[in-house]
């Protein structure tokens, strides 16, 4: 009797549930403004206009998918889908009309279906489960380097050789802490997002003096729309460089000459790697925390600077320690820029093309050959393709899913690029020169 009653109630609930309005893709695509944003996930339509300001990843990253299908991005960025979907229910306003395809703007349904099957295979292979010993050892080797740095100055004194040696050791620990915070920021270590967030704040804040929220809001935009102008902040070069093939021609046609871009492959060495972290990032991070009143992240950052100056002021004094810190940042900046740009700058950089998830990530990323050194040196970002396709996958599993990704790309004729390390680094300079030459030709002749 009870079971029958329960089944009757469930049937009644289903019959009484309101029928959702249906919309065409043409209608959905009209709602792609900052003040009017709809997006589609699994054929369901959500109005995120008001809610996007409360989105944990930031307003912009979710807004970049306004007017289009966001299913694969949604799956890529979120761990606990059941928990996230609770927040989506009040935003549901309709669904795609029965005759409408699941993909917008002619995106390939076969590529999308095959990629989702590949993701399911990776889940079945438990490739989204982290080896906690691996990440504990990464943290341990950072602490060891910090300790060796202090001991070098303590034992050998503050001469030029010991100071420079210590700076290189600490720059190495900073670079490795940068790769480690990246893991926690992508929620790829713990099953619970909360634990990832807490450790992320510790690593990026206490070990590096930076802001977790600043990094999240910036970096997830890059992952959502890599190498897309107006959407990926990493290709917003503030008129210092022109990138890809479209931008330099547009600048040339408009006679824009903020700098001599035909020489950008040369001045890159002077204003790119040396200055990004000690000048631009360091200033931007501090100002962002203050302007946004992000006091938690600011407290974590202050804990880093407090620890650093307590450690090194007895040896170098306050001014000397400040100079020492900026020299470390200077060294780290070179490492960071070359590693992060070797996978992206030589790739396609353009306006929004509305590609499917697999195609968009492959057009914007390439890999560097695997080796123990390359894995360590780049924090496994030599597997940039796999990282972009599966941001929440622990990095030690990238090499396991890579053959499956290669096979899927071969099936659909999508280029899967993998290079030696030196070739990838040289391609940064080559791509800057190519873009600079395109600008000069357009500037002079168009």
Image (spheres, rainbow, N blue to C red):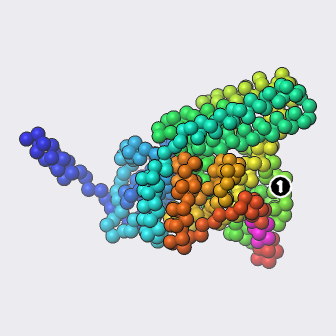
Identity of the residue furthest to the front in this view: 372
Which residue lies at the image location 55% right of the left edge and 51% below the top edge? Answer: 397
> Closer to the camera, 116 or 209?
116
For residue 434: magenta?
Answer: yes
Q: Mark 1 packing: few (<14 Cα in 10 Å), some, or many (20+)? A: few
Query: Please, what is the dominant secondary structure of the magenta stretch?
Result: helix
- In percent of width and height, residue 438 lies at 76, 71
Q: Is residue 70 visible?
A: no
Which residue lies at the image location 62% right of the left edge and 47% below the top edge? Answer: 218
- In percent of width and height, residue 177 lies at 67, 39
Whether residue 336 is situated above or below residue 163 in the rendered picture: below
**Left or right, residue 367 beside residue 12:** right
Disc 1 target residue: 269
Which residue lies at the image location 60% right of the left edge and 53% below the top edge? Answer: 222
Q: Secondary structure at mark 1?
A: helix
Q: Is residue 222 visible?
A: yes
* Range drawn in magenta: 431-438
For residue 365: magenta?
Answer: no
> Closer to the camera, 186 or 292?
186
């Amino acid at each position: 009797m009870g079971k029958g009653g329960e089944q009757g109630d469930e049937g009644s609930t289903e019959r009484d549930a309101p029928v959702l309005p249906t919309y065409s893709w043409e209608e959905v695509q009209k709602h792609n403004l900052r003040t009017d944003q709809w997006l589609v996930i699994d054929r369901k339509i959500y109005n995120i206009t008001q809610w996007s300001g409360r989105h944990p990843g930031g307003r912009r990253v979710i807004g970049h998918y306004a007017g289009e299908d966001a299913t694969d991005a949604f799956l890529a960025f979120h761990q606990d889908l059941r928990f996230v979907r609770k927040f989506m229910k009040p935003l549901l306003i309709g669904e795609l009309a029965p005759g409408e395809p699941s993909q917008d703007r002619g995106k390939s349904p076969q590529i999308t279906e095959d990629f989702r099957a590949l993701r399911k295979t990776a889940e079945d292979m438990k490739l989204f489960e982290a080896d906690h010993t691996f990440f504990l050892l990464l943290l341990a080797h950072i602490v060891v380097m910090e300790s060796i740095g202090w001991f070098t100055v303590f034992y050998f004194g503050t001469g030029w050789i010991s100071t420079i040696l210590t700076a290189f050791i600490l720059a190495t620990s900073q670079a490795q802490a940068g790769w480690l915070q990246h893991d926690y920021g992508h929620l790829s270590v713990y099953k619970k997002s909360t634990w990832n967030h807490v450790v992320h704040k510790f690593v990026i804040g206490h070990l590096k003096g930076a802001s977790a929220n600043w990094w999240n809001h910036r970096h997830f935009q890059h992952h959502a729309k890599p190498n897309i102008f107006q959407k990926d902040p990493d290709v917003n070069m503030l008129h210092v460089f022109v990138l890809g093939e479209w931008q330099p021609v547009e600048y040339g046609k408009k006679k824009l000459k903020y700098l001599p871009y035909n020489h950008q492959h040369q001045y890159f060495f002077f204003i790119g790697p040396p200055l990004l972290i000690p000048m631009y990032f360091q200033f931007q991070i501090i100002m962002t925390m203050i302007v946004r009143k992000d006091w938690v992240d600011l407290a974590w950052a202050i804990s880093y600077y407090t620890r650093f100056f307590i450690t090194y002021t007895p040896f170098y004094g306050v001014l000397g320690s400040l100079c020492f810190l900026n020299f470390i940042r200077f060294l780290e900046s070179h490492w960071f820029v070359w590693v992060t740009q070797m996978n992206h700058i030589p790739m396609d950089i353009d306006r929004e093309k509305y590609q499917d998830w697999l195609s968009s990530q492959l057009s914007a990323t390439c890999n560097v050959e695997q080796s123990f050194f390359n894995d360590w040196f780049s924090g496994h970002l030599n597997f940039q393709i796999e990282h972009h396709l599966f941001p929440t996958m622990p990095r030690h599993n990238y090499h396991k899913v890579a053959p499956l990704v290669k096979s899927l790309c071969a099936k659909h004729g999508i280029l899967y690029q993998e290079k030696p390390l030196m070739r990838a680094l040289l391609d940064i300079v080559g791509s800057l020169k190519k873009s600079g030459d395109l600008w000069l030709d357009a500037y002079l002749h168009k």
